[in-house]
Each structure stands twice: as C-alpha cells, then as structure tokens.
Amino acid sequence: QVQLVESGGGLVQPGGSLRLSCAASVKIFSFYTMGWYRQAPGKQREMVAAIPRAGPTDYGDFVKGRFTISRDNTKNTLYLQMNSLEPEDTAVYYCYMGTSWGQGTQVTVSS
C-alpha cells in the first residue's frame, strides 16, 4: 500500500507563499497522474493541480498562475509551490498518487 506524507502547511499572511511536499513510500515514476486537491470547511473538495507522468500540467481555474506543481522522481516527492496566497486559499490540502491519498495538511491564510 502506498503511503503519502504531506508537509509544509501552516499559517501565512495574505500575499505570502508556502511550499507543500508529498513524500511517497514508493517510486513515483510509476504513477501516471499525481496531484493536489483541497477542501475548505463547508465546501466540496476541488482540484488544485495535477501532473501526469508526461505531458502538460493542469490547474484549477482559481489558481490563476499563482501555484506551480512539480515532481522529483529521484526523491519520490510531489510539490506544490503556492504564491500570492489569499484568504480564500485556506483549506486542507491533500495529495494523491493513483488511487492513494495523503492525510492532508492545513493551510491557513490570514492576517
């Protein structure tokens, strides 16, 4: 069973940045698609970003060029660089690889 451990969440002021990491217990090059979802209180889970093994990345419409998803196959880690964070970005962020999900990491954007 694949284990995914997220890190990098926390409290940041509006306009700030965070880098989320998702470390996998297996070699990630075998996963066709990996990505991030988020869920805010009282809202449905929504896609943040996805990265296939090959091909273009995909982002939710709300990202608007602020986030960048990347993968390091040598470290078996998925990343999400988030810049220009807004209070509306406050949510629990989950990474996925194939059908496996991480436990989530809280991101809070507040002054």
Image (cartoon, rainbow, N blue to C red):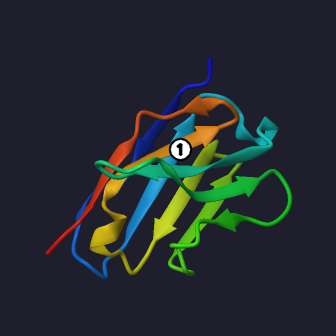
Quadrant of the image for the C terminus? bottom left
Query: Foreground: 11 or 38?
Result: 38
Image quadrant where residue 110 sits: bottom left
Amino acid at circle 1? Cys
Q: What is the x, y in percent for residue 48? A: 54, 59
Query: Foreground: 52 or 45?
Result: 45
Q: Which residue is mark 1?
A: 95
Residue projecting furthest to the left: 111
Image quadrant where residue 70 sits: bottom right
Q: What is the x, y in percent for residue 25? A: 59, 28
Q: What is the x, y in percent for residue 104? A: 40, 40
Which residue is at a point 34% across and 54% down the rendered structure image? 91
Quadrant of the image for the N terminus? top right
Image quadrant where residue 60 sits: bottom right
Query: Foreground: 95 or 79?
Result: 95
Which residue is at a point 60% across and 60% down the rendered structure image? 49
Which residue is at a point 53% across and 44% down the rendered structure image? 95
Left or right: residue 107 versus residue 104 is left
Residue 45 sits above or below residue 109 on the image: above
How many numbered circles does the render carry?
A: 1
